[in-house]
Image (cartoon, rainbow, N blue to C red):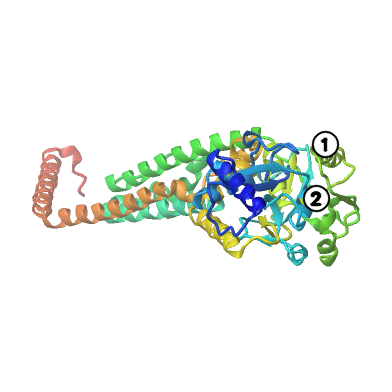
Amino acid sequence: MALMTSSLDMFVVCVLFGVRVESRLLNANGTVDAEEIYTVCTANFPPYVACIEGDSSPTNFSGYSTEMFKRAASKLGWKAKNYRLLCLPFNDLVNDLTDPDGTCDMATAAMTVQLESIEKGIQFAYPDYHTGQGLMVYTSGVKTNRWLFLKPFSWVVWLFLFLAALAVGVSARVVEIIAKPKAAEPSEGKEDEKAGVGELVWSAGAQIVNAAEPMQAFSIPSRIIIFVWAFLILLLVAMYTGNAAAILTASAVDVSIQSIDDLQGKNWGAYQFTIEIMHLNGWNPTVLYDPQTVAETDHMLDQLESGVIEGLVWDCGFVDYITATRCNFYKVGDCITEDNRAMAFWQNATASLVNAFSTAVLQLEASSELSHIHEVFIKPTSTICESEAAGDQQQVTFNQVSGLWIVLTATIAWSMLMAFVARHVKLTHLHRLYKKTLSREVGKELGEIDLKQATVIDNPVAFHGP
C-alpha cells in the first residue's frame, strides 16, 4: 500500500509541475496527449534529411522527409512540444524500430518500403515519395550538334512557317483575281510582267530569309495579306535570333552513355542493397557502395568524377538533387527501377496511429504540398545549371506563337471577303458610271477618226490615189 501511495504521489507531482511522461506509443491513435513526447528518429541522408548524428535540436533538422513529417503531424493536431527529433546512424535507426527496448517511436528518413523490413515487424504509412534507382554520369564536355540551328523553334513552328508561306502566296493570287481580274491577267506578249501563283509562293517563302524582292500586288486586300505576313516574319526572325544566340552560347553536356546498357563491360557502381534487383535485370555493377557518412558519400561521387567508375546507379531523389546542384553530373533518362519511401513505425505501434499518418500523407499529396516540398528540397530549380535551363526553356513552341497564325488566317479570310465585296460593288453600283465612261471614250475615238479623215482630204499630199 505504501508503494502504491508513493507511485500515486509521484504521478501527481509530475502532473503538477508539468513534467512530461515519455512513452513509446502507449495506445497512441493519432492524437497526442499533452503530457507525452514521442521520439521521431531520422538519419542524415541528403536531400531527404540533413542532420547531425546524436543531435536533437529542432533547428538542426531539414530536408524533404523532415518537412513532410512536420506537415503531416500538423494535420493531426500535433504540436512541436509533442515530439522530438533524433538523428541516428541509418543502420541503428532500422534496428531500433524492432528493438523492444529501443528509443524510436517512428522514423522519418525516406525508408524504402521493403518486404524484408515488414517481415521484421516494421510498419509503414502510405508512401510519401515514389522513386527508384536512377543512373548518373559525370561529364565536362560540350555537346556537338549539327542540327542545333533548328533548335530555337519546335518542329511544329517550322512546319507551319512554310505552310503559311504557301497559303500567303496562293491566297494573295486568289484575292488578286477576285478583286481585279483584268489587272491580274498577264498582258499579251508580257507573260512575265504579272506575278503568278508560283512566283507569289516563291516570294512569300523566300522573304523568310530575305532572299526575294517584295511580293507584287495590285489590290488593297492582297496588300494587307502581304503586310501581315511581313509583320509575322519580323517577329519570328527576332525570336529566332535571340534564342539561337542563347542556345549557341550556352554549354551543353556531351553524354556518351545513353542508358545503363552502355555501362556493361565498364566499371560502374550501385548501392549494395540493390544488387539483387540489378542481377535480376541483367545488370552487373563492378563496385558496390554503402556510405554511412557525408565523407563516404563525397568519396563515392569523387570516384565518379575522377573516372574510377563511369556511372553510378543510386536513389533517384539523390540523383535529382546532385544533378540539380552540381552542373557536371548528369542524370541519364528516368528512374530505371521503382520503389516507395514512407514513414516507418515501431513494430508495436497501433494500426490507428499508422492509418492516421497515412491519411495525413494522402491529404498532403492531394493538396500538392508533397510536390512543392519535392521542388524545394529534392530538385531546387533555383540552382539548376544555366546550360540545362537554356536547353529546356529557350525553344519556341507553336502554342507560344499560334496567335500570329490566327492573325494571318483572319487577315486572309477578311481580305478575300473584302475582295468579293469590292467586285460586287463594281458590278452593281459602278455599272452606270462604266457605261458613261465607255460612251465618252467611244465618242472621243469617233471624233478623232473624223478629224483624221478631214485632215487627209484637206491635204493633197496625203492623197495617193491612182
Secondary element at image label 1: helix
User: Which of these two is toward me, 317 or 78?
Assistant: 78
Label drawn at residue 91: 2
The residue at 87%/38% (across/down) is 306
Image-based side of 222 in relation to 433, left or right: right
Secondary element at image label 2: helix
Q: Position of residue 364 (x, y in %)?
A: 52, 53
Q: Which residue is mark 1?
A: 295
The image quarter in which residue 28 lies: bottom right
Q: Which residue type carries mark 1? A: Ala
Q: Position of residue 425 (x, y in %)?
A: 15, 54
Circle 1 residues within 10 Å: few <14, some 14–19, many ≥20: few
User: Does residue 332 sit above or below 121 in this rendering?
Assistant: above
Disc 2 vs disc 1: which is toward the camera? 2
The mark nearer the N terminus, 2 or 1, is: 2
Q: CA distance from mark 2 to mark 1?
A: 17 Å
Label drawn at residue 284: none
User: Which of these two is toward me, 402 or 462?
Assistant: 402
Circle 2 residues within 10 Å: few <14, some 14–19, many ≥20: few
